[in-house]
């Protein structure tokens, strides 16, 4: 199992990175990205610390931690530049907090993110056909999420991703220990979105390919 979207105490998560990684490992995860919420106020604080602890965990704990960031509620005009800054600070994985229907994300966030140098557009809500087509063209993965609320549009996201052959990954968006799920529950959530077991395995391969690419 690979999860490319989780949160620690460096944003609104409940656990320090080492405990988050250990709990994920017990659930069956072998690769974990820690992608705390970031904007212009805190990327310089978060990223170097996740880089440092991620290296220590990866060397000693038997699970690979990818240092990342989730750019959250950033103005669409600023996403591309902040993504570049996050890369320069050492973030290997850039996630953007998409236009979920349960938060007042600025319209235009999905499109701006898909034009920037990012890896995953998280919980993109009622994403448009054109935006999904752009995600496919640019090789940016769309997220199926296990997180309550954000998951309400999983079916819509998966249907359009399938239509336009966009890459999809399944992530926990974990903030607390109970958010980490095992293989069986992840499979059920994917099936609930209208996908098949083969689609779930493809999502897992997509995540593995992203992890390999960003850590190369």
Image (cartoon, rainbow, N blue to C red):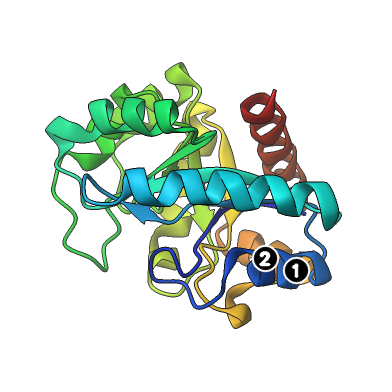
Q: How many neighbours does mark 1 have within 10 angstroms: few (below 14), some (14-19), or many (20 or more)?
A: some
Residue drawn where x is 75% and y is 68% of the image: 22
One can see residue 17 in this view: yes
Quarter occupied by the C terminus? top right
Q: Position of residue 98 (x, y in %)?
A: 32, 49
Q: Nearer the viewer, residue 65 or 208?
A: 65
Task: Give the mark count.
Answer: 2
Q: Position of residue 189 (x, y in %)?
A: 62, 66
Residue drawn where x is 49% and y is 33% of the image: 90
Residue drawn where x is 51% and y is 62% of the image: 173
Q: Which residue is mark 2?
A: 18
Q: Which residue is mark 1?
A: 22
State the SS at label 1.
helix
Q: Nearer the viewer, residue 188 or 171?
A: 171
One can see residue 65 in this view: no
C-beta proximity under 8 Å, tags 2 and 1: yes
> Mark 2 or 1, which is nearer the eye?
2
Q: Position of residue 195 (x, y in %)?
A: 63, 52
State the SS at label 2.
helix
Q: Quadrant of residue 183?
A: bottom right
Q: Which residue is the extreme one toward the bottom?
A: 178
| Cα distance in 3D space between marks 2 and 1 | 6 Å
Q: Position of residue 154 (x, y in %)?
A: 47, 57
Quarter occupied by the N terminus? bottom right
Residue drawn where x is 19% and y is 55% of the image: 105
Q: Quadrant of residue 212?
A: top right
Q: How many neighbours does mark 2 have within 10 angstroms: few (below 14), some (14-19), or many (20 or more)?
A: some
Q: Which residue is the extreme one toward the top?
A: 137
Query: Image check: 78 left or right of 130?
Result: left
Vertically, is 55 above or below 141? below
């Amino acid at each position: 199992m690979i999860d490319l979207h989780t949160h620690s105490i460096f944003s609104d998560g409940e656990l320090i990175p080492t405990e988050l990684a250990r709990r994920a490992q017990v659930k069956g995860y072998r690769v974990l990205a820690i992608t705390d919420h970031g904007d212009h106020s805190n990327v310089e604080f978060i990223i170097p610390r996740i880089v440092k602890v991620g290296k220590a965990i990866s060397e000693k704990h038997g699970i690979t931690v990818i240092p990342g960031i989730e750019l959250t509620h950033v103005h669409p005009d600023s996403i591309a530049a902040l993504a570049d800054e996050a890369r320069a600070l050492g973030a290997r994985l850039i996630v953007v907090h998409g236009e979920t229907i349960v938060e007042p994300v600025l319209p235009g966030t999905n499109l701006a993110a898909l034009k920037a140098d990012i890896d995953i557009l998280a919980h993109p809500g009622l994403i448009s056909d054109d935006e999904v087509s752009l995600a496919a063209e640019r090789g940016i993965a769309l997220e199926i999420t296990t997180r309550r609320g954000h998951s309400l549009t999983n079916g819509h996201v998966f249907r359009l991703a399938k239509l336009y052959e966009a890459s999809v990954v399944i992530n926990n968006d974990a903030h607390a220990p109970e958010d980490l799920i095992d293989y069986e529950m992840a499979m059920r959530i994917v099936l609930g979105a209208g996908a098949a077991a083969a689609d779930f395995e493809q999502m897992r391969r997509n995540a593995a390919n992203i992890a390999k690419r960003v850590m190369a």
